[in-house]
Each structure stands twice: as C-alpha cells, then as structure tokens.
Amino acid sequence: MARAGRWLRSVAAVFDKDWRSELRTRYAISALLMFVVTTIAILMFSLGTEEAPPEVLSGMLWVVIFFAAMSGLSRTFVAEEERGTTMTLQLLTSPGAVYFGKLLFNLVLVTGLSAFTVVLYALFINGFVIKNVLLFVVTVAFGSVGFSAAATIIAAIIAKAATRGTLYPVLSFPVLLPLLLAVINATRLAAEGAVFADAAGEFQLLVSYIVVVVTASALVFEYVWKE
Amino acid sequence: MSMTGTTLRGKDLSKSYGRKVVFSGISFGVGPGETLLVTGRNGSGKSTLARILCGVLSPTGGRIGLDPDPGDNHADRVHLFGLVAPYLQAYEEFTAAENLAIATRIRGNVPDPSRISTLLDRVGLNNRKHDAVRGFSSGMKQRVKYAMALLHEPDVLVLDEPMANLDAEGTAMVREVMGEHGKRRTLIVATNDLTDCERFDTRVDLSGSARG
C-alpha cells in the first residue's frame, strides 16, 4: 500500500515537473498553437465561402489535430534526451512512473490542443455545425486519450533515434490510423445529428484501442526507456 | 563504528555493443566502509560499468548481487544509489533548490527545505540556490550533481570522474564527502587519475579487459 502511494506520488511529480518545465520553456505549447492557428488560417482562406460536406470537414478537423500533435507531443521525451536528463530520471524512479507521468502530461496537452482547435474550427470554418454536441464532446475526449496513449510510447521510441523529427509523424500515422478512422466517423455522425447507438461501433473500437495501446506501452516501456 | 549499507558483488560482468566488447570477465566485491576504485584508459568502460552498477544499464553477461537484496522493484534498487558523473545532468530551467525538490518528489517523498538548504550549503551553492542551473558554470553544475546524489542518503555512492570541472575548494568538498561516505557506507570511484582516490580497498582495472 505504501509502495503504491509512493508510486502514485512519483507519477504526479513527473507530470508536475514536465508541466512546470513546459510553462517556463513553452517548447510544445508554442509549436502546437502556432501549427493550429496557421493551418486553420490556410483552410479558411482556401475554402472561402464554400461549404464542404460534413465528412470532409470532420476529416479536416482531425488532420489539423493529428499534425499539430505531431509537432509538439514528442517533446516530453525528446527534451529529456537532448538535455541529457534521461539518466537523471532513470535514477529517480521506476519506468512505469515515468511512462504514466508523461502520458498524463501528453493527455493534458492533447485535450487542450483539441479544445483549442475545435473552438477555432467552429468559429472560422464555414459549414462546421455539430448537431449532437454530447456525442462530439465524448468523441474528442476518447480521441484525445487514444492520441496521447499512442503518441507517448512512439515519442519514447523515436527519442532514441537520430532522425527523430521526421520519424515521429511517419511512425505515428500507421499506429494512429484505426483511431483516426474511428474519430473521423464519430465526428461525422455527431455533425449529422446521429445518436450514441449509431456510433457504438466507433466507441467500441476507441475503447479497445486505448486499452490495448496503454497496456502494451506499460509492458514494453521499461525496455524502451532503459537502453 | 556502525556500518550501514549495501554490499555489491559483481560476478563475471561483461558488456558488448554488437560485436564490440567493452569489457568482460569483471568480478569484484565491495561493502559498507569500503571503497572500490575502477580504473582504465579512455574508452575502457569505466562509465559503462558505473551505469551498470547503478542499474540504469544491463550487463551483457554476468550478474550483480546486492546484499541485502532490494528485490526486482526498479525504484527500490535505484534508490540505493547516488551517482555523480559528467553525463548526468540537472534540469537547467529550474533552480538548484528546485532541482533537489523535484528529485525528492519524483522519488515519491516530500521535500524538506531545511535538508535542501543544508546540502546546498555543503556543496557551496546556498547563496545561488534560487538561480536557474542554466546560468551556472560547469563546476557549479558538478556541485548540483553532488547535492542531488547525496539528497536521499544513498547506501552506495558512485563517483565517475569525481573531480571533473571542480576548483580547489570543490575538490576539498568532494574529498570530505568521499571520506565521510567511505567510512560507513559503500563508495565506488571511477577515474583515470589515481590522486582522486588514494585510499581504496579493492581495485578493478578495465584496461585490457575487452577480450572477446
């Protein structure tokens, strides 16, 4: 019991350290926000007054979130490697505490990123109307958890590579493809005003994806982290 | 004098990266109140051995036994060790005092400001404890590493190139730390310069140990 309490405090401390570091350096937040603003501005100018169908708008929303996430989410591990603090962290706590602390940090980052993107998208992209708001909110929430789960373990792997900048989106795309297809479909259904029962298949896939990715990541992380 | 701490026994340790054998056939034993000196020319694997001993790198062959055995829990094992090494870094965006508080929290404990203040005083940084590590000289960064390594009162202190970047005052501080720690607990020093550690109980020379 005492060991579990200490482990949980370690997880919270890793998250707290990353969050305070991010607030001071603004590496990830700046990259994410600038990407979202510029991409939505380009979309806005290219669409003009045209109204694209819901399936196209849903896809475009998640394309923006995917590439924005790819521009900033790897920082949590890449920064440790670049600053030479990986071993410092290895000497302080268990790999599991590091993984879940970093996962929590990425989850907060992706949730904030998704909320910011959705607000800008709704304000500036013509024809983006959500008829079932609750379904959409749940989709974004599950999408954020799935995104951060996959992005965290991939970031840990690519942080060890020399070509980490280009490797991250390339490696992430096939891993995130099932998640992307499910959230794009669920977003389209929310835009069309469908009920939860219509999106049951998408949510089953999302929950399975999250459980599988988090479990597999927790199991393999020690090997990725240690050497 | 009461001895507290952990005994380390390395048996037939080897480390290879692909076909490149860094060292092989290394055996030793060191316990509380004893000092193990690891020597060897550049590239002979002193730092690699230091990392293996601390549990952050796995050996290719052989094993390290700890007595008492902390079990398989990684956190329990690494908490036994304090490491000071040129390749170990503090978080530069934080101050020296914040680094020590962060290290304590990540270990799952509650930081004690008076303990942090005492330690920074001991390494000669108390007057700069609220400055970001980014602005420190390499010698001051080395002192931060000493404070971080001693913070949790480790059973085993591993010093890799212990005098790196330090001035005369810093060197004297390190000798004092080595003397105190080596009296009751386990001390491991990896260095090229034998004047860094004149008193030792066991010596492992890694030069020429890279036979395939």
Image (cartoon, coloured by chain):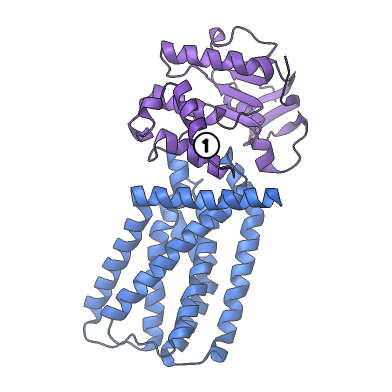
Chain colours: A blue, B purple
Q: Quadrant of residue B59?
A: top right
Residue type at mark 1 is Asp
Q: Position of residue A99 (x, y in %)?
A: 57, 53
Image quadrant holding the N terminus of chain B, namely top right
Q: Quadrant of residue A45?
A: bottom left
Q: Position of residue A3 (x, y in %)?
A: 69, 48
In the rendered image of this protein, does residue B202 appear above or below residue B148? above
Q: Along the horizontal axis of the image, is A27 left or right of B89?
A: left
Helix, strand or loop at label 1? It is loop
In the rendered image of this protein, does residue B153 appear above or below residue B98? above
Q: Residue at x 49, y 26 (%)?
A: B118
In the foreground, B15 or B48 = B48
User: Residue under mark 1: which chain is it in?
Assistant: B
Q: Residue at x 49, y 83 (%)?
A: A186
Q: Residue at x 52, y 68 (%)?
A: A145
In the foreground, B209 or A132 = A132
Does residue B45 show up? no
Residue topped by disc 1: B112
Q: Residue at x 67, y 55 (%)?
A: A219
